[in-house]
């Protein structure tokens, strides 16, 4: 890939953004050396790796990575029997600890199936928690070994503390003794060369017998180790030497453990670097709202709502850029500071990012082609040192590009032909574009020349594009309009800025008639385009409003259905209470009659009368509440597979067999097959069943029998989508589905995020994951039903 073009397109800044997301030094080095790839297979694998890492970051958060040092050299020395330093051992232990953390992070069912690229990176990951824990607990820092690293070390240090305590006690006693107080310069205990001493005045040297270890710069003070503590100091020195030997043994022991883990540690070092690099790409994609583009090798680029990654995504205007399908060369015209160069750089940098395995800040469905090389002649190439003008410097670069470019190149020219005589410059620009077109390369160029606009209009597979400019506000809109040549706005801008009318009129007369006609045609095309865009916007608004009204109507219908069910349920409860109360009153009356009645026949007559009355009450309640309004079924008109309602269950099923001579037949309700009498059946109301299906609130087994295994939520607002998903999961559970596929599209990821958050709390969702390659990738979610 052309290094100069990479610099012009500021790929180094993209790599710096990626480097900022990396944690380990190995991954940072990999970010610094990142270059675009020319093999389509490798590009697709790298992009898939980024997609999986981004998906895991969204689902599980950032993996538990921490900075680790280079360990391969240390491991080789350990294998050779060398003793590693405390720092080297800590680095090795940290690598083992990070490897264990990664193993825990990826420890889930079907991980290899759902994330094949990340699984491939982590294949062969080695863990040794025991060794890493031992080293980290024993080695506090590069300079300090813990007391409990070994029992011998613990005992030695305890002895040293005991000896030091004895020395301090002896010296403090000496300081407090009046015999020595006059001879001491200060009443303190200090150290010189790991030996405890006291500061003594030079003239009183003989007063304090001992060994002189140092003196002050003036010579007035000498530092004496009193003879009373010389022996104890010597014993401390012996313990210190033994301590050093023990630390060496401890380091040797841990070095031997590292040597045993050498093959795994070497693999872990590479795996952690690759793992961190993949997640740096994933985190960068999340930060810039990137998407995985569709890759091809046919020279087709179709960037939808693309944004330059170095511009603030909140303020930058997304643009659509495409070429390679119906045309190979794109000529972009428009005013200065109107966004031409930004559009050109966006095209170049997004292509390079995709070929480097990075997601691009664009809309889902964008396409990027793999090129052998990307050439860019952008910016002011003037060189004082080489005595080159702007035109000459550009031409030197263009000459080089024309020599190196081929059919598998993307060529970008900014202000082609500028910096010299307009007539000659325009002619050169047309000739250069013709040569690039002839060699089959894909090309985009910005210009102000009308001759190049005409060339684009008249030449096959060359297309015009314009950066829109609002004459009313005198501001560019930064929208790229492909298929429309840019119009010169010099006269309109000058008029708005207050230039006199007669000067503008004179200028218009000086412009030749053909140019004026050409500009008028462009103006007409521009007006037509704006009207078409306005109509399209109105149509889209109408469609969106229609969808909102439809959703509102569905919600209202569901609410009415729910209220209706509640009313019926309450009515049934009231009816039961009325019947129970009447029955209770009847029983009490009978008891009273038994007590007072003398005539048994009269008692029986009254009892039969009450029984008949209760029967009438029950029959009336049954007709009004318990029974359906549907008429009884005519056995002769009943058909196999016909939908019927079992009145005793309030459920809908289908007929499996025709009635026998006794009126008995088989009916299937959901997964349950039963034998019922035709008198217990009513014809199912199809209209009502459809309403139930639309409302999605009254659950029936008949409905659940026809639930599909996928739900398409594309085009729904978040609230509407969650309502539909909730209803769908209820139906899927009733129908006995094990798993379902939810289609939400990729888009900005907002709908996907809302669905995942909803599923984490849903009682029917056992687990969920992103769609794998071939299932829909980021555009779908697979749910396992409880």
Image (cartoon, rainbow, N blue to C red):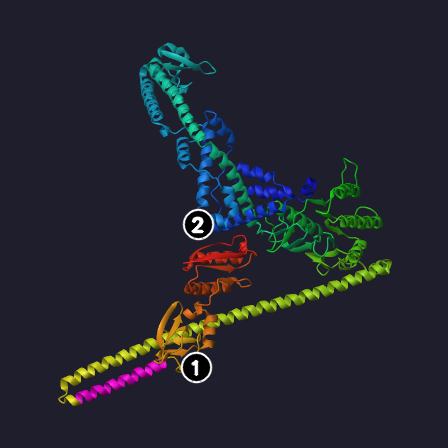
Dot label at residue 55: none
The percent coordinates of residue 374 (x first, y second) are 69, 45
In the rendered image, the vertical position of residue 18 relative to residue 238, given as above or below: below
Write down the region rendered in magenta.
602-625
The quarter holding residue 761 reads bottom left
Front-lying residue, 473 or 38: 38
In the rendered image, the vertical position of residue 675 relative to residue 123, given as above or below: below
Taking the image as shown, residue 75 lies to the left or right of residue 660, namely right
* Secondary structure of the residue carrying numbered label 1: helix
Which secondary structure is most common in the magenta stretch?
A: helix
Residue bearing mark 2: 109
Q: Does residue 166 appear in the picture of this structure?
A: yes
The percent coordinates of residue 303 (x first, y second) are 65, 54
Single out the mark in the foreground, 1 or 2.
1
Which residue lies at the image location 30% right of the left edge and 77% below the top edge?
576
* Secondary structure of the residue carrying numbered label 2: loop
Residue found at the very far top of the displayed protein:
206
Image quarter in which the N terminus is found: top right
- The answer to if 343 sits in the magenta stretch is no
Front-lying residue, 434 or 233: 434
In the rendered image, the vertical position of residue 164 relative to residue 593, given as above or below: above
- The answer to if 620 sits in the magenta stretch is yes
Residue found at the very far left of the displayed protein:
598
Image quarter in which the C terminus is found: bottom left
Residue bearing mark 1: 637
Which residue lies at the image location 48% right of the left edge and 51% below the top edge?
59
Taking the image as shown, residue 671 lies to the left or right of residue 440, namely left
- Alpha-carbon neighbours of circle 1 within 10 Å: few (<14), some, or many (≥20)? few
């Amino acid at each position: 890939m052309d290094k100069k073009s990479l610099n012009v397109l500021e790929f180094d800044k993209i790599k710096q953004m990626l480097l900022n997301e990396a944690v380990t030094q190995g991954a940072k080095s990999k970010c610094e050396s990142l270059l675009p790839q020319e093999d389509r297979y490798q590009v697709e694998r790298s992009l898939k790796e980024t997609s999986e890492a981004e998906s895991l970051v969204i689902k599980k958060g950032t993996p538990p990575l921490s900075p680790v040092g280079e360990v391969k050299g240390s491991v080789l020395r350990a294998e050779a029997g060398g003793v590693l330093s405390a720092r080297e051992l800590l680095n090795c232990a940290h690598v083992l600890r990070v490897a264990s953390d990664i193993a825990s992070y990826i420890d889930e069912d079907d991980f290899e199936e759902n994330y094949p690229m990340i699984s491939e990176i982590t294949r062969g990951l080695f863990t040794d928690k025991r060794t890493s824990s031992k080293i980290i607990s024993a080695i506090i820092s590069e300079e300090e070994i813990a007391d409990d690293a070994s029992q011998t070390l613990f005992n030695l240090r305890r002895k040293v503390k005991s000896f030091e305590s004895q020395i301090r006690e002896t010296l403090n006693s000496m300081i407090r003794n009046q015999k020595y107080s006059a001879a001491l310069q200060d009443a303190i205990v200090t150290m010189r060369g790991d030996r405890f001493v006291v500061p003594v005045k030079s003239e009183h040297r003989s007063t304090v017998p001992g060994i002189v270890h140092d003196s002050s710069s003036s010579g007035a003070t000498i530092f004496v180790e009193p003879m009373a503590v010389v022996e104890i100091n010597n014993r401390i020195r012996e313990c210190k030497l033994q301590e050093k030997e023990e630390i060496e043994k401890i380091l040797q022991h841990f070095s031997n453990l590292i040597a045993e883990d050498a093959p795994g540690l070497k693999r872990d070092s590479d795996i952690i670097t690759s793992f961190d690099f993949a997640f740096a790409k994933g985190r960068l994609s999340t930060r810039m709202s990137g998407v995985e583009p569709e890759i091809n090798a046919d020279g087709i680029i179709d960037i939808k709502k693309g944004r330059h990654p170095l511009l603030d995504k909140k303020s930058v205007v997304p643009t659509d850029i495409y070429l390679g399908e119906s045309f190979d060369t794109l000529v972009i015209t428009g005013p200065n500071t109107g966004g031409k160069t930004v559009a050109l750089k966006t095209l170049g940098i997004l292509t390079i990012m995709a070929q480097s395995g990075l997601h691009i800040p664009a809309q889902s469905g964008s396409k990027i082609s793999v090129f052998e090389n990307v050439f860019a002649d952008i910016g002011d190439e003037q060189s004082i040192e080489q005595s080159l003008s702007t035109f000459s410097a550009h031409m030197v670069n263009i000459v080089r590009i024309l020599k190196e470019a081929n059919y598998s190149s993307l060529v970008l020219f900014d202000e082609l032909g500028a910096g010299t005589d307009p007539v000659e410059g325009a002619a050169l620009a047309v000739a250069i574009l013709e040569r690039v077109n002839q060699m089959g390369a894909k090309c985009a160029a910005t210009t102000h020349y009308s001759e190049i606009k005409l060339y684009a209009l008249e030449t096959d597979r060359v297309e015009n594009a314009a950066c829109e400019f609002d004459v009313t506000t005198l501001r560019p809109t930064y929208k790229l309009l492909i298929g429309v040549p840019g119009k010169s706005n010099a006269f309109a801008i000058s008029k708005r800025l207050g230039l006199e009318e007669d000067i503008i009129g004179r200028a218009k007369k000086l412009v030749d008639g053909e140019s004026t006609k050409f500009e008028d045609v462009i103006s007409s095309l521009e007006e037509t385009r704006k009207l078409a865009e306005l109509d399209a916007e109105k149509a889209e608004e109408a469609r969106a409003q229609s969808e909102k009204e439809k959703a509102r109507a569905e919600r209202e219908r569901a609410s009415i259905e729910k209220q209706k069910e509640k009313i019926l349920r309450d009515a049934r409860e009231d009816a039961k209470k009325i019947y129970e109360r009447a029955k209770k009153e009847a029983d009490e009356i009978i008891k009273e009659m038994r007590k007072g009645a003398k005539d048994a026949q009269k008692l029986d007559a009254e009892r039969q009368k009450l029984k008949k009355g209760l029967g009438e009450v029950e029959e009336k309640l049954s007709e009004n509440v318990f029974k359906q309004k549907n008429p009884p079924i005519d056995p002769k008109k009943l058909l196999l597979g016909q939908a019927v309602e079992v009145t005793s269950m309030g459920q809908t099923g289908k007929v499996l067999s025709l009635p026998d001579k006794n009126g008995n037949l088989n009916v299937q309700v959901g997964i349950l097959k039963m034998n019922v009498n035709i008198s217990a059946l009513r014809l199912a109301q199809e209209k009502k069943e459809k309403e139930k299906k639309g409302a999605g609130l009254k659950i029936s087994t008949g409905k659940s029998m026809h639930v599909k295994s996928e739900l398409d939520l594309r085009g729904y607002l978040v609230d509407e989508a969650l309502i539909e998903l909730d209803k769908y999961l209820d139906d899927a559970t009733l129908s006995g589905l094990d798993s379902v596929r939810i289609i939400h599209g990729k888009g900005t990821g907002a709908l996907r995020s809302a669905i995942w958050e909803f599923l984490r709390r849903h009682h029917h969702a056992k687990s969920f994951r992103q769609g794998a390659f071939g299932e829909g990738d980021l555009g779908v979610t697979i749910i396992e039903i409880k």
